[in-house]
Image (cartoon, rainbow, N blue to C red):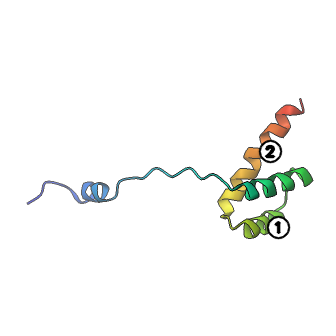
Amino acid sequence: MDDVSGNDQVAADNPRRKKRYHRHALRQIQEFEALLQECLHPGEKQGLRLRKRLCLETRQVKFWIPNRRTPYYSSSW
């Protein structure tokens, strides 16, 4: 009989995998940049249209825009 508890066995069978870094394609980056040139704070509808057009997940658009917007604020000081 094994001395491994049920929780330990699950952890051994399913080790956590590190998420792979995802680099966007040049076309996707250009679309993001064009959107930010037009408006620094795009609305939900604009984000949804961009997500569908670029075939991205909502989280990717949701996090990319604020991260990319940061340099605009620091350069304006």
Name the residue beneath numbered marker 1. Answer: 45
**Residue 69 tag number:** 2
The picture places residue 51, in percent across and down from the top left corner, at: 73, 65
Q: Residue 48's quadrant in the figure?
A: bottom right
- SS class of the residue under badge 1? helix
Q: Amino acid at mark 2?
A: Arg
Crowding at mark 2 (Cα within 10 Å: few <14, some 14-19, many 20+): some
Q: Residue 74's quadrant in the figure?
A: top right
Residue under the image location 67 percent in, 64 percent down: 56
The picture places residue 24, in percent across and down from the top left corner, at: 67, 54
**Residue 29 tag number:** none
The span from disc 2 to disc 1 (Cα, nearest Å) is 18 Å
Residue under the image location 26 percent in, 54 percent down: 8
Residue under the image location 85 percent in, 57 percent down: 42
* Image quadrant where one finds the N terminus: bottom left
Residue pushed farthest top? 77
Q: Count the labels in the image.
A: 2
* Image quadrant where one finds the C terminus: top right
Q: Amino acid at mark 1?
A: Lys
Crowding at mark 1 (Cα within 10 Å: few <14, some 14-19, many 20+): few
